[in-house]
Image: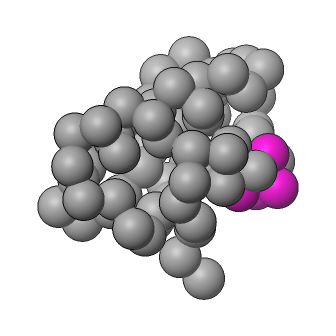
C-alpha cells in the first residue's frame, strides 16, 4: 500500500471535488481518493506508487491543476 498527498488548485465546490476524485480514481492501482475542498489537499491510496505525471494528467482532465 502506498499513500501520496498533493494539493490541487481551483476547486470551489463539491462538484469540483467529485470531478477530481473520479479522474484520479481511474488511475491503475488507486484504491481510494480523499479530497479536502478547503485546503485543496488530495490523499491517494494505491497498491503501488502512482506517477506524479499520471496524477497531474488526471487533475488536468478534471479541469484543475496541481500546485507547484
Was residue 7 drawn as part of the magenta stretch in this picture?
no
Q: Residue at x 39, y 68 (%)?
A: 10
Secondary structure mostly seen in the magenta stretch: helix
The color scheme shown is one colour
Q: Is residue 45 visible?
A: no
Q: Is residue 22 visible?
A: yes
Quadrant the N terminus occupies: top right
Q: Residue at x 60, y 32 (%)?
A: 23
In the rendered view, does 6 fall on the left or right side of 16? right
Q: Residue furthest bottom?
A: 68
Q: Residue at x 22, y 39 (%)?
A: 14
Quarter of the image for residue 61 reads top right
Name the foreground residue: 62 vs 40. 62
| Residue 21 picture location, percent across and down | 46, 32
Compared to residue 6, the image places residue 23 above or below, namely above
Compared to residue 33, the image places residue 20 above or below, namely below
| Residue 48 picture location, percent across and down | 75, 28
Name the foreground residue: 49 vs 10. 10
Was residue 54 drawn as part of the magenta stretch in this picture?
yes
Region of the chain picked out in magenta, as a range: 52-56
In the rendered view, does 5 fall on the left or right side of 49? left
Compared to residue 31, the image places residue 36 above or below, namely below
Q: Residue at x 43, y 70 (%)?
A: 9
| Residue 20 picture location, percent across and down | 48, 40
| Residue 37 picture location, percent across and down | 23, 53
Quadrant the C terminus occupies: bottom right
The number of callouts visible is 0
Q: Residue furthest left?
A: 38
Amino acid at each position: 500500500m502506498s499513500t501520496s498527498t498533493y494539493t490541487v488548485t481551483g476547486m470551489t465546490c463539491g462538484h469540483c471535488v467529485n470531478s477530481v476524485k473520479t479522474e484520479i480514481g481511474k488511475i491503475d492501482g488507486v484504491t481510494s481518493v480523499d479530497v479536502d475542498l478547503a485546503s485543496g489537499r488530495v490523499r491517494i491510496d494505491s497498491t503501488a506508487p502512482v506517477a506524479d505525471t499520471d496524477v497531474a494528467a488526471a487533475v488536468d482532465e478534471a479541469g484543475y491543476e496541481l500546485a507547484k
